[in-house]
Amino acid sequence: MLVRRLRRAYRRAAVRGYKPPAAAESYRGVWVLVEQTAGEGAPVSWELMGVGTKLASELGVPLEAVVLGDGVEHLAGEAIAYGAKKVYLVDDPVLATYRTYPYTRATVDLVRKYRPEILLMGATTFGRDLSGAVATELETGLTADCTRLEVDPETRLLKQTRPAFGGNVMATIICKKHRPQMATVRPRVMEMPKKDGSRSGEVVREDLFLAEDEIGTWVLETIEEKGKAVYLDKAEVIVAGGKGLGDAANFELLKELADVLGGTLGASRAAVDAGWISAEHQVGQTGITVRPKVYFAIGISGAVQHLVGMQTSDVIVAINNDPKAPIFKVATYGIIGDLFEIVPALTREFKAKLSSPRAGAKGGRPWTKSLMLR
């Protein structure tokens, strides 16, 4: 306990007495790099516009966006609709398909020219590859997979919070000596801001100055994965099970409930590690981050590794026989008892309500009304 208090006091003192290096004074502005595939913007980029707007407002600077690609000028308008005051657009055939070198070159050139103090990207395959290359080239820090971003108005330091030590603790990281301060955020962690097409902003067009024969890699073919995919990050209802189910066969109980609600089956890492369900269903730090309207946590104790992946769900219903389970701390509704009795009862109740003549009546989705548990 004493050691923890001393560490906290040291951190407070370190931040309180902090003075940014002279070079950092010339860096101003918050940037969001807009990820796109075939001209379609990734939702995580628009989610970052929401938190970017908040950070920019607290720092007293504009929120700006970067759009890279070929034939992507329409995304500049979309970025403005989500809150960007200015968009830096590099529209070039060389950027038609993502490759590390040309995208890194375009991003680094823009950063060196315009000097933003904060640069945000999505923690996707695209963002994880690009952010590491850009941070290395710029010789600055990078915090990956953040779950919370805040700024200290006095020091202008970006406080980047992410799970650490296998998800057992939450660490807050700052980058004192280098700029820009860079962070990636997983999809569905931040709330999607409202899109307003009436917003106006400035589009700054920049050239790439990079020829195709200067790049040592080519994309020969893109192969789309076939088969039934599990889109946990897009699901509005998730029914997830953990080690408390006791056996792989018991996931069938959860599947019945998910099917009734039109939901998707999820799982904790413990259930996946036990071989009860495939890894594509895993929710958490080492799985998928989700933000559904309703999340059922059934037989899940609530380890930090799992909580960081689902705690921003609109409604969380926890079912566990242990009243001290950590999952109840984040739950909207908690049911303490035997899941083998509770889950079938819920399935029957929802099935009865959704099959009634009034289930499709005007006034909202039937499963939303049904979840007004009392």
Image (tube, grey):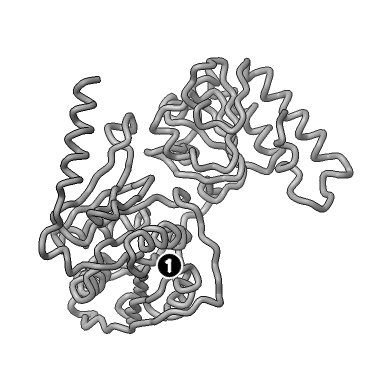
Q: Can you name the residue that lies furthest to the right here?
A: 357
**Front-most of 338 and 190?**
190
Give the SS element for disc 1. Answer: strand
User: On the image, which quarter does residue 320 sit in?
Assistant: top right
User: On the image, which quarter does residue 347 sit in?
Assistant: top right
Q: Quadrant of the C terminus?
A: top right
Q: Is residue 43 left or right of residue 341?
A: left
**Front-most of 279 and 235?**
235
| Residue pictured at 41% horizontal, 67% vertical | 36
Q: Position of residue 370 (x, y in %)?
A: 74, 37
Q: Quadrant of the N terminus?
A: top left
Q: Amino acid at mark 1?
A: Thr
- Provide the residue designation for mark 1: 37
Q: Is residue 218 left or right of residue 348?
A: left
**Front-most of 270 and 313?**
313
| Residue pictured at 54% horizontal, 23% vertical | 299
Q: Position of residue 164 (x, y in %)?
A: 29, 36
Q: Position of residue 144 (x, y in %)?
A: 29, 49
Q: Is residue 111 above or below residue 237?
A: below
Q: Is residue 29 left or right of residue 108?
A: right
| Residue pictured at 46% horizontal, 27% vertical | 302
User: On the image, which quarter does residue 366 sit in?
Assistant: top right
**Front-most of 215 and 104?**
104
Q: Position of residue 125 (x, y in %)?
A: 35, 55
Q: Is residue 225 left or right of residue 153?
A: right
